Image (cartoon, coloured by chain):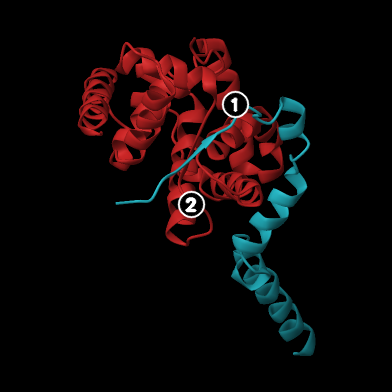
Chain colours: A red, B cyan
Amino acid sequence: MLNTSYHMNSFLLEEERIQIEKAKLNPEKFGPLYKKYYEPIYRYVYKRMDDIETVNDVTSMVFVKAIANLNKYEFRGLPFSSWLFRIAKSELNQAFRNQKSQRTVRLDKVVIGQMMDEIVENDSEMNRSKLLNSLTRLKSHQLELIEMRFFEKRSFREIGELLDMTENNAKVKTFRALNKLKQIFNKLE
Amino acid sequence: MQKIKIIVDNMEPSKSDILSNQNFEKVLKKYNQLYKPAVFMNPWFYGIVGLSSLLIAIIVN
């Protein structure tokens, strides 16, 4: 399932570009963009943090920083959300550095089941526990790729845009991260 | 290596829960606190002060 709100047609992109230009002149005009992107940014932050109060603070700061840096934003035909997600990533890292919250991965049982299909044939409680343990042993960039592709169901194109790499590179790196996860999983007793 | 916490969470917040946290006024207020330049940093401030001084100088002389 692709994130359809991310993949916009040229008419919607143009409409968004006009909203951005208005907001550059007057921050109060940022309101429609805030309303449009609040939920996806909130969910992105929520899935990576354990403390709800900090989730609210970080989400707000993403938009404060976006308004402050809007003049630096250049429209290059990509959805505005990819720029916002990059700010969100940077704010999350800042919060982890300041130890306001711990890096967290939130999963539901359905997603764990789907991930098990990628890793191993036997979906037992013990293997599920091994999978969760393996995830904590990945490097942060590998975990980010696994999260985006397998837990959040993002397309490789979107992952590439969010992580500033080509679609093909996103695909290659995601498969490498998945292989690494399998290796860690198989080494664990 | 960064310590990672795993939460098996079957109760993701609903759309309405998330949207109830929206507060654009608060975001604008925070932006104004952190980034809006003070009055004396605004070029208009120096323009107005300069013009006023000139007017006073003309009137006094």
Drawn side of residue B2 relative to residue A26, left or right: left
**Residue type beneath disc 1:** Ile
**Disc ID at residue A102:** 2
Count the numbered circles shown.
2
Q: Residues within 10 Å of mark 2 (few under 14, many from 20)?
A: some
Q: Nearer the viewer, residue A11 or B22?
A: B22
Q: Which mark is residue A18?
A: 1
What residue sits 77% from the left and 48% below the top? B25
Q: Is residue A53 above or below residue B54?
A: above
Q: Nearer the viewer, residue A134 or A158?
A: A134
As displayed, is residue A61 above or below residue B41? above
User: Label 2 is found on which chain of the structure?
Assistant: A
Image-based side of A162 in relation to A180, left or right: right
Place of residue A79 in the rendered image (x, y in percent of width and height, measured from the top left): 49, 24
Front label number (1 vs 2):
2
Q: Mark 1 touching mark 2, by CB under 8 A?
A: no
Q: Is residue A159 visible?
A: yes
The chain ID associated with circle 1 is: A
Which residue is painted at 73% across and 76% down in the image? B52
Separation of marks 1 and 2 at Cα, in angstroms? 38 Å
Within 10 angstroms of label 1, few (less than 14), some, or many (20 or more) residues?
few
Q: Quadrant of the C terminus of chain A?
A: top left
Quarter of the image for residue B42 reads bottom right
Whole-percent x and y of residue B6? Answer: 47, 39
Q: Which residue sits at x=70%, y=81%? A: B53
A135 w.r.t. B60: above or below: above
User: Which type of secondary structure does the marked residue at label 2 adopt?
Assistant: loop
Q: Specify the label residue A152 is tagged with.
A: none
Q: Amino acid at mark 2?
A: Gln
